[in-house]
Amino acid sequence: GDSVTQMEGPVTLSEEAFLTINCTYTATGYPSLFWYVQYPGEGLQLLLKATKADDKGSNKGFEATYRKETTSFHLEKGSVQVSDSAVYFCALTPNTGNQFYFGTGTSLTVIP
Amino acid sequence: EAGVAQSPRYKIIEKRQSVAFWCNPISGHATLYWYQQILGQGPKLLIQFQNNGVVDDSQLPKDRFSAERLKGVDSTLKIQPAKLEDSAVYLCASSLAPSGNTIYFGEGSWLTVV
């Protein structure tokens, strides 16, 4: 069945460091891919998405490119800030299905 | 545009008691989801509605959990009787359509069972 696998955390980085959080997926057809972010004590918020191969989603300095050949959607940011400390979830929804599949989440802590 | 509204935000109950959570989705969103998120884990789908019909409730523990969406708008999720392992955040989410669309989450209802 469809699924998402993301790198385990926690991840701790210094401010202004480069961030990569890996996400790979298993799905038939061409799913839509998402990154959601969850700040402490809050619900999940959409960070970015991509709906077809080679699309790049971007928001708040974060980017992720939909790679069909490697079935990946890695999240990157060139220079992280303390305010980026949160849990990041990769997710997919099949274009012909009706459910969202979430990864287990990766906790990021950015230290000054 | 108003987001997904949930209440209560926090609830503490004793085991074997009952609790109910309410959700009001974004206006016009036909699909409504209830997720359970245990601390340190990703969201797990409990039930999905399309309008007022159930699309998927395969992971809903039906012996103690129930949910309804009578008029295709608001929804309630009930737990009776609660167990210690039900301590979690209950997230409501909604989307325009069930396939390929973004889902939007509420702030969550945080349940502690003691």
Image (tube, coloured by chain):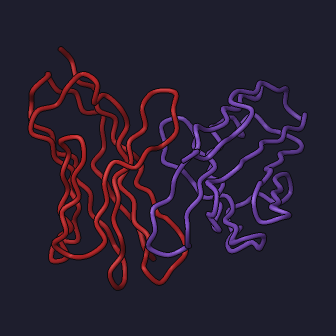
Q: Which residue lies furthest to the top in this view?
A: A112
The tint of chain A in the picture is: red
Q: Where is residue B76 in the image (x, y as percent from the top left)?
A: 80, 50
Q: Which quadrant, please, contains the C terminus of chain A?
A: top left
Q: Is residue A33 left or right of residue A62?
A: right
Q: Where is residue A103 in the image (x, y as percent from the top left)?
A: 40, 54
Marker count (numbered)? 0
Q: Position of residue B75 (x, y in %)?
A: 77, 54
Output the letter for the chain in purple. B
Q: Is residue A89 left or right of residue B99?
A: left
Give me the residue at 79% from left, 50% from top: B77
- Name above or below for residue A28 compared with residue A55: below
To which quarter of the image does residue A91 belong? Answer: bottom left
- Name above or below for residue B95 compared with residue A61: below
Pick the residue in front: A6 or B76: B76
Give me the residue at 80% from left, 61% from top: B69
Q: Where is residue A58 in the image (x, y as percent from the top left)?
A: 21, 52
- Name above or below for residue A36 compared with residue B71: above
Give me the residue at 34% from left, 35% from top: A107
Q: Which quadrant, please, contains the N terminus of chain A?
A: bottom left
Pick the residue in front: B90 or B7: B7
To which quarter of the image does residue B29 belong? Answer: bottom right
- Name above or below for residue B21 compared with residue A28: above
Give me the residue at 55% from left, 63% from top: B95
Pick the residue in front: B23 or A8: B23
Q: Residue furthest front?
A: B1
Q: In this view, does A60 lie to the left or right of B6?
A: left
